[in-house]
């Protein structure tokens, strides 16, 4: 380490002497009592009002905020910083890196802290660990369901939002017969309807589906085949083009906003875009219709939480910051900037009316996303699952083959 | 040598340029539309000039500061790269010893290694030297680009007539004088070309500043562009508007400098 | 006039610089030589500090269970290497990476050379045209991904599909959703982005071809086509070597463009090796594994680069 340091110092000296006059000063000063470093993927604009309010109420503390764009850049930047000991006191812990952070003991256990009292159990366990440990303060959740173009539906003579998957497919046929593209879904990541089906199934099984799969007492094949078969009916019944594996969410949303497709998968982040692009459109969101007599469900997860660095330079200020972040006033500021569905029990978010049908389910945690519920190897399985789903859509794989592929993948990671 | 200005060439090339430039046109034209218009007719010209995107960016993004940061880093890194690269190329041209040739071959490693493999170790190194989150640190990292400069310059030098250099040497000029007064002017075309390549590369680089900078005051322009990227969706109007703003200085730079990619050799001075 | 990438110039009399001198020790010569050698010090410093040292670290990590988060690692010997060679998903990108590299190298070279020749001529709006062709290389890949995604959209509303529909009544093609078409599309977009850049490189080299050559040839009655094949092309050989070296190494390391356009899909059809390295290192926290893949990959690319340069030198000697 010292040798590397001297070599690096020599090199930088030789090359940077002429620049001594310009260029900024070294960012990290000493760890003064009043400084708190904070790193997340929220934008500067989003967090500025929240941070300003915090500093106002805690005059001795100055917050130094830095960010990186989600998701991969954020994770890799955080990774390098933790490795080199330059990570912030408070940073965002996301589903994508929580396993690494928790197993590597890089984050502090927040169990029993007072500021967790108004956070729903679902959000606590998402970023939790053994024995009820909680590693992240997650104050919002997202849920994705189906977004309906009420005008197009009316044109085809449909008046009610379907509650079962069979009704949904019948509606698709009806729209198709009326000359309207019924439904589009970007298949470049885990599928929303599929996640909802799996979520309903898991909930009916006492939420133990993934525990069983990952401790070896069950296989993906035992649970996934029926949901996969139902989902693939969209293609086996000729309702959706297989070209959706090449469509991005943005493109689907553009088609929806221009009135070319009647229904699409959407989350809260889609609503502002649709409103701006098509202000006069009548839209309504609803959970994914259920299969096998199970209730409608949502795909979704707890939003990234705020975690305290195990090697934080200012842990006291970090705790104060977290305590502030889930107070109603901080929630109001955050919610205004992001439009997120916040979940703290003492604050009711104001949201676009189109979202009204799903808010309750999101806040109660009736949401599911495979890669977050999986116990380990999430990314490996997710990459494999996405590829398999694309093959399924193109008719190159059967539901059984997809489930088996996942089982094989899981087995290969142990 | 006089060349006839062929009008056919102009027509064909402008037409081709039009086709090739469609994506660029798409970016610029859509920053001048409302989101509704962009969704409905992305390729059409805007019905009326919608300047809100640019206004918003000018009001909320610290353009001046980021521009200055980017400028400082780009100029400093470029100068260092060109110096290091051309001095190495000169040395290689002056003496073809076995050692030099093997060394030159080793330098090719710089092109073979994927950047991601060295990112984390470099980061740790800079942390150790306390250069993270500084513009100086960025310049140090960019110095690695000198190997690319060396590569291009060296190949170019090796094709130049050596007599001019021999003549200067016989006249008693020292190595530095030969380098500065004779070789550098001779390699002007490749210096300008490499200069353009590297300037564009550094100006638009995202990964390096993203990893090595953290304070918002040190942000470069490209980092500001990525502010619009969200977890689930990107604010494309802002992203595109910022991208256009970042591109404009580069367009100006390119137009001004590419005229200098002209022959450094006077026709007739070479008798082969 | 002989020229090659790795050996420096010979004087025009064909004698290597410095050869044929009397063997007694010449002080001024020695001083001159060492002064010249000093010019290599800066690049050597850069090379060692910014490349060799980090590489050694990565190489070390490839033998450990490094997650990327903590420097506390355990030695695992060759197990990472074994996993790389036996796990099919690690090497899933190999096929496409190779296809991409060769495809772009050939197509870009075929486009860039004529383009450079044309851009070297004087014509109205030449500067404007030069800029337009060069600029695809400049905007961030993220934004180009958006634009090309829109142009190549598989729906009828996509730009290319609507143009094809109105001109030829050809049905909507799944440019990015069909495995083969996706691969082709990615390569075409890469050519679009790279041809102008490489044309600029060739343009610089075109400046070093003395105008006299063409004048003499014209006087002798050679047609433009003959001049191109017998003067321009041979004298551009060094530029071709360099350009292709960059295309080869760049192509093998490619990640941004395919990822932004297709995320490696559909299925694994446009997956790349670097994508494997990044995914296993960053998203999956298996940095030791990623380092092993990177080490093997570097070795493979080095072999390809050496082979390519060796072949190029033989061709150069033949042509010049």
Image (tube, coloured by chain):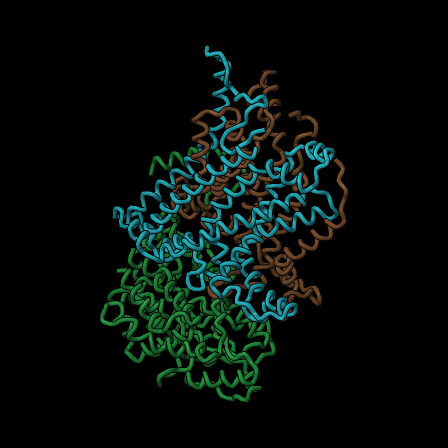
Chain colours: A green, B brown, C cyan
Residue A410 x %, y %: 29, 64
Q: Which residue is painted at 48% across and 50% down in the image?
A: C101
Decide if residue B60 is on the left or right side of residue A380. right
Q: How many marks?
A: 0
Image quadrant in which you'd find residue B185: top right
Residue A36 can be seen in this image: no
- Specify the farthest residue to the left: A217
Q: Residue furthest front?
A: C221
Q: Is residue A67 left or right of residue A200?
A: right
Q: Is residue B82 left or right of residue C74?
A: right
Q: Report the quarter where the C terminus of chain A lies.
A: bottom left
Question: Residue at 54% of width from left, 42% of height from top?
Answer: C243
Q: Is residue A105 above or below residue B93?
A: below
Between residue B267 and residue B271, name the one nearer to us: B271
Q: Is residue A12 above or below residue B56?
A: above
- Residue B79: image quadrant is top right
Residue A396: image x %, image y %?
41, 69
Q: Nearer the viewer, residue A233 or A317?
A: A233
The residue under the point 41% across, 46% down is B119
| Quadrant assignment for the N terminus of chain A | top left
Residue C17 versus residue B167: which sits nearer the camera? C17
Image coordinates of residue C53 in percent, x first then y, are 38, 38
Which residue is at the far top?
C24
Q: What x and y, as percent, mark residue C124?
A: 75, 47
Q: Is residue A314 visible?
A: yes
In this image, C228 relative to A21: left or right?
Answer: right
């Amino acid at each position: 380490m010292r040798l590397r340091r001297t070599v690096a110092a020599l090199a930088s000296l030789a090359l940077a002497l002429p620049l001594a006059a310009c260029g900024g000063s070294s960012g990290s000063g000493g760890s003064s009592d009043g400084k708190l470093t904070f790193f997340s993927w929220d934008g500067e604009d989003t967090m500025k009002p929240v941070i300003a309010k915090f500093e106002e109420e805690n005059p001795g503390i100055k917050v130094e905020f830095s960010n990186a764009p989600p998701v991969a850049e954020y994770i890799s930047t955080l990774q390098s910083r933790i490795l080199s000991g330059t990570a912030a006191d408070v940073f965002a812990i996301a589903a994508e890196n929580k396993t690494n952070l928790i197993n590597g003991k890089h984050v502090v256990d927040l169990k029993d802290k007072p500021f967790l009292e108004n956070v729903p159990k679902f959000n606590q366990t998402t970023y939790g660990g053994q024995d009820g440990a909680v590693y992240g303060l997650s104050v919002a959740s997202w849920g994705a369901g189906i977004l309906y173009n009420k005008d197009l539906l009316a044109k085809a003579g449909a008046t009610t939002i379907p509650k079962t998957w069979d009704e949904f497919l019948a509606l698709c046929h009806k729209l198709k017969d009326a000359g309207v593209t019924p439904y589009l879904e970007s298949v470049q990541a885990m599928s929303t309807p599929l996640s909802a089906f799996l979520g309903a199934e898991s909930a009916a099984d006492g939420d133990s589906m993934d525990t069983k799969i990952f401790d070896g007492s069950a296989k993906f094949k035992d649970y996934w085949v029926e949901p996969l078969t139902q989902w693939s009916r969209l293609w086996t019944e000729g309702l959706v083009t297989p070209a959706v594996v090449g469509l991005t969410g943005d493109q689907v949303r553009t088609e929806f906003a221009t009135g070319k497709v009647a229904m699409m998968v959407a989350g809260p982040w889609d609503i502002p875009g649709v409103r701006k692009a098509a202000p006069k459109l009548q839209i309504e969101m609803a959970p994914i219709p259920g299969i096998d007599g199970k209730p409608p469900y949502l795909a979704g997860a707890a939003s990234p939480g705020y975690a305290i660095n195990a090697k934080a330079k200012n842990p006291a200020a970090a705790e104060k910051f977290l305590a502030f972040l889930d107070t109603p006033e901080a929630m109001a500021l955050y919610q205004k900037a992001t439009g997120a569905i916040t979940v703290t029990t003492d604050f009711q978010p104001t949201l676009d009316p189109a979202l009204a049908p799903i808010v309750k389910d999101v806040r109660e945690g009736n949401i599911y996303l495979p890669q977050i519920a999986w116990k380990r190897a999430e990314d490996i399985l997710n990459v494999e699952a996405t590829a398999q789903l694309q093959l399924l859509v193109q008719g190159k794989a059967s539901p059984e083959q997809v489930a088996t592929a996942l089982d094989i993948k899981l087995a290969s990671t142990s | 040598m006089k060349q006839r200005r062929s009008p056919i060439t102009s027509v064909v090339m402008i037409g081709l340029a039009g086709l090739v430039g469609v994506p660029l046109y798409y970016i610029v034209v859509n920053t001048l539309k409302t989101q509704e218009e962009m969704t409905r007719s992305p390729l059409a010209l805007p019905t009326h000039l919608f300047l809100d995107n640019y206004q918003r960016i000018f009001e909320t993004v610290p353009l001046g500061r980021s521009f200055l940061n980017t400028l400082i880093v780009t100029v400093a890194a470029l100068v260092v790269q060109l110096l290091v690269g051309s001095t190495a190329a000169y040395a290689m041209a002056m003496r073809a010893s076995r050692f030099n040739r093997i060394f030159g071959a080793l330098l090719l490693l710089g092109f073979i290694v994927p950047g991601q493999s060295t990112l984390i170790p470099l980061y740790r190194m800079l942390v150790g030297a306390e250069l993270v989150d500084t513009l100086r640190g960025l310049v140090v990292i960019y110095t690695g680009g000198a190997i690319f400069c060396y590569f291009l310059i060296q190949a170019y030098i090796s094709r130049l007539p050596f007599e001019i250099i021999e003549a200067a040497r016989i006249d008693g000029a020292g190595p530095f004088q030969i380098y500065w007064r004779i070789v550098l002017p001779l390699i002007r075309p490749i210096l300008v070309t490499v200069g353009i390549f590297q300037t564009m590369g550094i100006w638009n680089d995202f990964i390096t500043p993203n990893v090595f900078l953290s304070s918002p005051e040190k942000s470069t322009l490209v980092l500001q562009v990525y502010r619009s990227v969200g977890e689930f969706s990107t604010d494309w109007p802002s992203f595109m508007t910022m991208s256009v703003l970042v591109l404009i200085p580069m367009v100006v730079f390119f137009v001004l400098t590419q005229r200098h990619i002209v022959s450094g050799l006077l026709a007739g001075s070479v008798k082969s | 006039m002989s020229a090659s990438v790795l050996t420096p110039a010979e004087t025009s009399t064909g004698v290597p610089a410095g050869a044929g001198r009397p063997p007694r020790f010449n002080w001024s010569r020695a001083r001159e030589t060492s002064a010249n050698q000093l010019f290599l010090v800066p690049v050597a410093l850069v090379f060692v500090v910014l490349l060799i040292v980090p590489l050694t670290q990565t190489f070390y990590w490839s033998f450990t269970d490094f997650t990327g988060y903590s420097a506390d690692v355990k030695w695992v010997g060759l197990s990472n290497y074994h996993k790389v060679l036996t796990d099919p998903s690690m090497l899933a990108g190999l096929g496409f990476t190779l296809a991409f590299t060769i495809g772009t190298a050939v197509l870009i070279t075929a486009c860039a050379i004529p383009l450079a020749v044309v851009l070297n001529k004087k014509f109205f709006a030449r500067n404007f045209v030069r800029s337009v062709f060069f600029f695809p290389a400049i905007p961030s890949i993220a934004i180009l991904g958006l634009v090309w995604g829109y142009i190549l959209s598989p729906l009828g509303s996509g730009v290319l599909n609507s143009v094809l529909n109105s001109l030829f009544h050809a049905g909507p093609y799944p440019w990015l959703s069909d495995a083969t078409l996706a691969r082709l599309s990615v390569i075409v977009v890469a050519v679009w982005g790279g041809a102008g850049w490489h044309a600029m490189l060739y343009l610089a080299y075109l400046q070093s071809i003395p105008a006299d050559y063409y004048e003499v040839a014209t006087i002798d009655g050679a047609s433009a086509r003959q001049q191109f094949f017998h003067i321009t092309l041979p004298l551009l050989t060094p530029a071709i070597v360099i350009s292709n070296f960059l295309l080869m190494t760049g192509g093998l390391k490619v990640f941004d463009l395919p990822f932004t356009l297709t995320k490696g899909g559909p299925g694994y059809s446009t997956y790349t090796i670097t994508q494997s390295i990044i995914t296993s290192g960053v998203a999956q926290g298996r940095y030791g594994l990623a380092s092993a893949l990177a080490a093997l990959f570097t070795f493979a690319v080095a072999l390809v680069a050496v082979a390519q340069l060796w072949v190029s030198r033989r061709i150069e000697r033949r042509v010049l």
